[in-house]
Image (cartoon, rainbow, N blue to C red):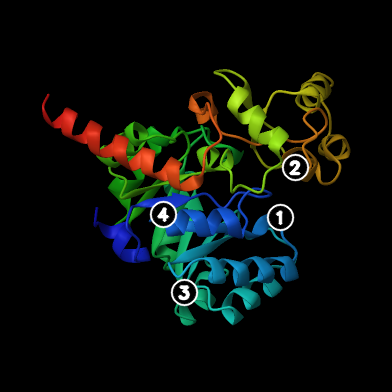
Amino acid sequence: MANKITKLFNIQYPVVQGGMIWVSGHKLASAVSNAGGLGLIGAGSMYPDVLREHIQKCKKNTAKPFGVNVPMLYPDIEKIMDIIVEEGVKIVFTSAGNPKTWTPFLKEKGITVVHVVSSVKFALKAAAAGVDAVVCEGFEAGGHNGREETTTFTLIPMVKEQVKIPVIAAGGIGSGRGMLAAMVLGADGVQIGSRFAATEESSAHKNFKNSIVATKDGDTELTLKELAPVRLIKNKFFNEVQELYQQNPTIEEIKKLLGRARAKKGMFEGDLENGELEIGQIAGIIHQIKPAKVVLNEIIEEFNLVKVNVGRL
């Protein structure tokens, strides 16, 4: 399945595992890479020394390419970037910030850089900054999204029309059918988060994994736009946020309710009532916790089967 993305990352399939906080550790990243995709370590929930440990363990567990996802709002980002260079990481995905800030530094070190965008405007800025590819993440995605609420399948063709670098689709993709649809619309590859969050190798708490499997259509909603838009499973904490909104709160009041480590509490520690449970709308088609290799193989098998059947229409 050779194309621009497989050549860019030197991988077998144009499938990238999302670098999710509290979910994407070395076990998941190495499992996806060993299965032929591109595994990503999610640095957003790791202290610098913890990230170094995960990178070193990932190198021991796979001889294939893997990368690190770095939200640029991270407070110790200088340390994070230095560790990435020191440990010889060859692929970095950046998000939540200006791509001009770190792209030149990383490119000078021979690192392939991909930036996550939620609009055509930011895709153009990323391309101008010199990134090697962009991830177009739509409204359906879990985690932190763009405020524009542009859906993935609307965003892909608009970005593809404007940029010449490879485009990776993300948000609402969790099957071979979804992968094929994204690529028909112009994507060169896909990034999948939610389905890999519910795998055996995911570092998420088992309670959170089970809640993903139980999630159905309408059970998630985008909220907290005043801080950083995030899609959450509706639970006690989510309901408290909605009740606060009825009072026309200030940003400070919202921050006070949010407090600290809500995502860790929910996704990593398994508090399904008081924690943030970040997941995409595609959770509605996730019905079982499986090994990452099985998940990737199922996606590719379905992609190939549906591609043949569509060709017969």
The kind of residue on which mark 3 rests is Ile
Mark 1 residue type: Ser
Q: Nearer the viewer, residue 78 or 101?
A: 78
Residue type (three-letter) at the residue carrying disc 2: Ala
> Which residue in the protein does label 4 denote?
35
Q: Which quadrant of the figure contains the C terminus?
A: top left
x and y, in percent, of residue 99 in the image: 53, 63
Neighbours of disc 4 within 10 Å: few (<14), some (14-19), many (20+): many
- Residue occupying the point 59% across, 49% down: 201
Count of numbered badges drawn on the protein: 4
For disc 1, the marked residue is 45
Q: Is the Cβ of the residue at disc 1 closer than 8 Å to that at disc 2?
A: yes
Which residue bears the numbered disc 2?
263
Q: Position of residue 63 (x, y in %)?
A: 45, 70
Secondary structure beneath label 1:
helix
User: Disc 3 on helix, strand or loop?
Assistant: loop
| Quadrant position of residue 308 | top left
* Left or right of residue 187: residue 247: right
| In the depicted structure, whether residue 230 falls above or below residue 15 | above
Mark toward the start of the polypeptide (4 vs 3): 4
Task: Give SS at disc 4.
Answer: loop
Q: CA distance from mark 4 to mark 3?
A: 22 Å
Q: CA distance from mark 2 to mark 4?
A: 28 Å
Task: Name the foreground residue: 243 vs 109.
Answer: 109
State the mark number for residue 111: 3
